[in-house]
């Protein structure tokens, strides 16, 4: 059974870059699946950030596209998220997820990232 | 403002059935059979309950069912149980601007 684990700093300064990694275990990131990042601000709903295929192909939420980069490292069986020029509005729990076409069937436990000086 | 519209809250008594709606447009819910539903308990990651409008992943109770009519999708939970109390989110593939996924704002289910 595939499992996902997010990791990265829990505190990022305003105007800085948020960087997170999602480690995939129990399966290969090179399988025929897309892999996504989803975030959830405190007390609010879910927001899809973007997705990546093991080939490196990506799709991003248009509202975040100018600030987001998602990359894959097949040698480490992981994928990563970078979000630049962060503000307090980017404070959220960030989840990585495996896709079943356009559904998210496996989720990481989530990691809280706070943007504050 | 979320792209998909859900009621903020619904409630029901144990044993009853409830339905949560998810309204979109012809560019998302109405145009594709890629509607999914997620259950989220406080402090936990979302859990996939329904995908592709009406399919249940292995291990999900058959008390959960999904359907769609026009631009509105629905999640029905029958035989409500206390552990069903949670937030529920719908999502859909969309082609409104570029290829991506949109979520509903979420519905808080209270089991009375």
Image (cartoon, coloured by chain):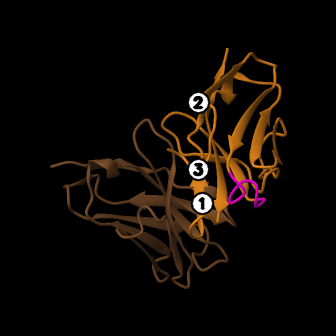
| Residue B32 highlighted magenta (yes or no) | yes
Label 2 SS: loop
**Residue A82 pos. (x, y %):** 35, 68
Label 1 SS: strand
Q: Tell if the residue under mark 3 belongs to the same chain as the one under mark 2.
A: yes
* Neighbourhood count class around disc 1 (C-alpha, 10 Å): few under 14, some 14–19, many 20 upward: many
**Magenta stretch bounds:** B25-33
Labels 2 & 1 near each other (Cβ < 8 A): no
Relative to residue B29, is residue B106 drawn left or right? left
Quick check: A8 above or below B80? Answer: below
Q: Residue B5 occupies which quadrant of the picture?
A: top right
Quick check: A53 above or below B105? Answer: below
The residue to which callout 3 is attached is B103
Q: Distance between the residues labelled 3 and 2?
A: 14 Å
The residue to which callout 1 is attached is B101
Between A79 and A92, the residue placed more toward the observer is A92
């Amino acid at each position: 059974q595939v499992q996902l684990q997010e990791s990265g700093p829990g505190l990022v300064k305003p105007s800085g870059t948020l960087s997170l990694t999602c480690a995939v275990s129990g399966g290969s990131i090179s399988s025929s699946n897309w892999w996504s990042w989803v975030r959830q601000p405190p007390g609010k709903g879910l927001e899809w950030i973007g997705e990546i295929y093991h080939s490196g192909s990506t799709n991003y939420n248009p509202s975040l596209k100018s600030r987001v980069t998602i990359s894959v490292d097949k040698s480490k069986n992981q994928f990563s998220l970078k979000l630049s020029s962060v503000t307090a509005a980017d404070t959220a729990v960030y989840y990585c997820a495996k896709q079943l076409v356009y559904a998210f069937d496996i989720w990481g436990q989530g990691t809280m990232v706070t943007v504050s000086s | 403002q979320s792209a998909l519209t859900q009621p903020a809250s619904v409630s029901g008594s144990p044993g009853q059935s409830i339905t949560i709606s998810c309204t979109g447009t012809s560019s998302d819910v109405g145009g594709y059979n890629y509607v999914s539903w997620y259950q989220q308990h406080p402090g936990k990651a979302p859990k996939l309950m329904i995908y592709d409008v009406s399919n249940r992943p292995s291990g999900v109770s058959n008390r959960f069912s999904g359907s769609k009519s026009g631009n509105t999708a629905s999640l029905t939970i029958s035989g409500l149980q206390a552990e069903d109390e949670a937030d529920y989110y719908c999502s859909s593939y969309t082609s409104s601007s570029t290829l991506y996924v949109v979520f509903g704002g979420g519905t808080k289910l209270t089991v009375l």
